[in-house]
């Protein structure tokens, strides 16, 4: 029977990345870091650290612990010489990520969301001797019992739309998606893009790049960018979309694909994504570098309702894998095995 502590924090999201060792961000986050270390040092039962960026605090843990590793994209970037696929990496970032890896290496067990993240970890920590368990990231319970209504107030009326959920970091490949949308519209298909999420850069550089490309491709009237959408309306956005498009070049999991599968909206997925294996015949897998491949997938789903509706009944949807109850049961079983 698991009898331990579960530690979760958002402190690293707000302050832990960006800036130098003596930057304002570093100084303002110091009290939170001390608090985390005191808590972990005081634990007298096994601990589960719910994010891999808590690995940098793991030297404070004196009991056995499990750590949840979503992805190691930034750690791989660091190992390749520091060229980042996400956000610009400072010296303090590099130091923290190296600390994350040292902490992960000390864990009694590691939970990862996909085989792709397991492979990343095996490359970066080939001598790790603990157990690694693949447990998919859960989708919010409200996706399984969605509210009624539509999202027309968010999507500029009733025009058919393609949905993209995520940041605008280079690895997300939104430039290829925009070029594919331009081609689809050039073929006479009336389709808009609704993009949900922050830019993914503190200085707004990625948003500026996105808006510049939208203007260059003359897509201004056909692209809507939203942030801070409530959970209930996110479900409606998924349900009303022709498809979800997530043509990422690298992902740890790809939660929007799982959310789309649960709602019954067909996802268009990069062949490089872990979700390509999870979705099977319930999604359309494309070459993320090919505008032609992506635009063809979008066109097929936008113009053939019979083809599109078939994805919702695919046996590969297996949405129970993404329910919080399944995730929790898998996690508890793993924790009990290691305790």
Image (cartoon, rainbow, N blue to C red):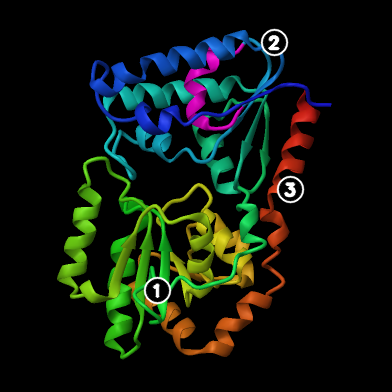
The secondary structure making up most of the magenta span is helix
Viewer-proximal residue among 43 and 104: 43
How far apart are the alpha carbons under marks 3 and 1?
34 Å
Q: Badge 1 is on which residue?
A: 294
Q: Badge 3 is on which residue?
A: 325
How far apart are the alpha carbons under marks 2 and 1?
52 Å
How far apart are the alpha carbons under marks 3 and 2?
27 Å
Q: Secondary structure at mark 2?
A: loop
Q: Residues within 10 Å of mark 1 (few under 14, many from 20)?
A: many
Viewer-proximal residue among 291 and 10: 10
User: Which residue appears at 36% of the width and 63% of the height?
Assistant: 195
Task: Say whether disc 3 or disc 1 marks the residue closer to the N-terminus.
Answer: 1
* Most distant residue in the right direction: 1
Q: Secondary structure at mark 3?
A: helix
In the picture, measured across the screen, residue 190 lies left or right of residue 34, that is left
Q: Is residue 257 magenta?
A: no
**Disc 3 to disc 2: CB gap under 8 Å:** no
In the picture, measured across the screen, residue 297 lies left or right of residue 143, that is left
Quarter-of-image position of residue 162:
bottom left
Please name which of the two marks, 3 or 1, marks the residue nearer to the observer: 3
x then y, percent, for residue 287: 43, 68
Q: Which mark is residue 44?
A: 2
């Amino acid at each position: 029977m698991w009898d331990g502590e579960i530690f979760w924090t958002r402190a690293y999201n707000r302050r832990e990345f960006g800036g130098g060792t003596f930057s304002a961000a570093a100084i303002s986050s110091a009290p939170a870091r001390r608090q985390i270390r005191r808590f972990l040092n005081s634990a007298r039962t096994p601990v589960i650290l719910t994010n891999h960026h808590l690995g940098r605090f793991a030297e404070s843990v004196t009991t056995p612990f499990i750590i949840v590793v979503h992805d190691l994209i930034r750690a791989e970037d660091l190992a390749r010489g520091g060229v980042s696929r996400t956000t610009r990496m400072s010296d303090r970032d590099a130091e923290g990520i190296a600390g994350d890896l040292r902490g992960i290496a000390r864990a009694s067990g590691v939970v990862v969301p996909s085989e792709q993240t397991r492979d990343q970890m095996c490359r970066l920590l080939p001598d790790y001797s603990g157990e690694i368990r693949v447990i998919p990231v859960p989708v919010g319970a409200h996706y399984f019992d969605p509210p009624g209504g539509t999202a027309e107030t968010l999507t500029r009326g009733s025009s058919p739309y393609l949905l993209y959920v995520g940041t605008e970091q280079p690895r997300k490949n939104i430039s290829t998606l925009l070029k594919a949308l331009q081609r689809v519209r050039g073929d006479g298909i009336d389709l808009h893009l609704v993009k949900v999420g922050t830019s993914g850069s503190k200085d707004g550089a990625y948003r500026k790049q996105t808006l510049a490309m939208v203007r260059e491709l003359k897509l201004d009237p056909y692209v809507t960018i939203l942030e801070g959408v409530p959970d209930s309306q996110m479900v409606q956005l998924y349900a009303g979309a022709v498809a979800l498009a997530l043509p990422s070049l690298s992902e740890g999991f790809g939660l929007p694909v799982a959310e789309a599968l649960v709602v019954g909206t067909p996802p268009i997925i990069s062949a490089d994504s872990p979700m390509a294996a999870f979705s099977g015949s319930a999604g359309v897998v494309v070459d993320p570098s090919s505008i032609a491949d992506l635009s063809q997938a979008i066109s097929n789903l936008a113009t053939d309702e019979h083809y599109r509706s078939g994805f919702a009944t695919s046996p590969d949807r297996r949405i129970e894998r993404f329910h919080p109850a399944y995730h929790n049961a898998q996690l508890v079983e793993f924790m009990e095995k290691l305790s």
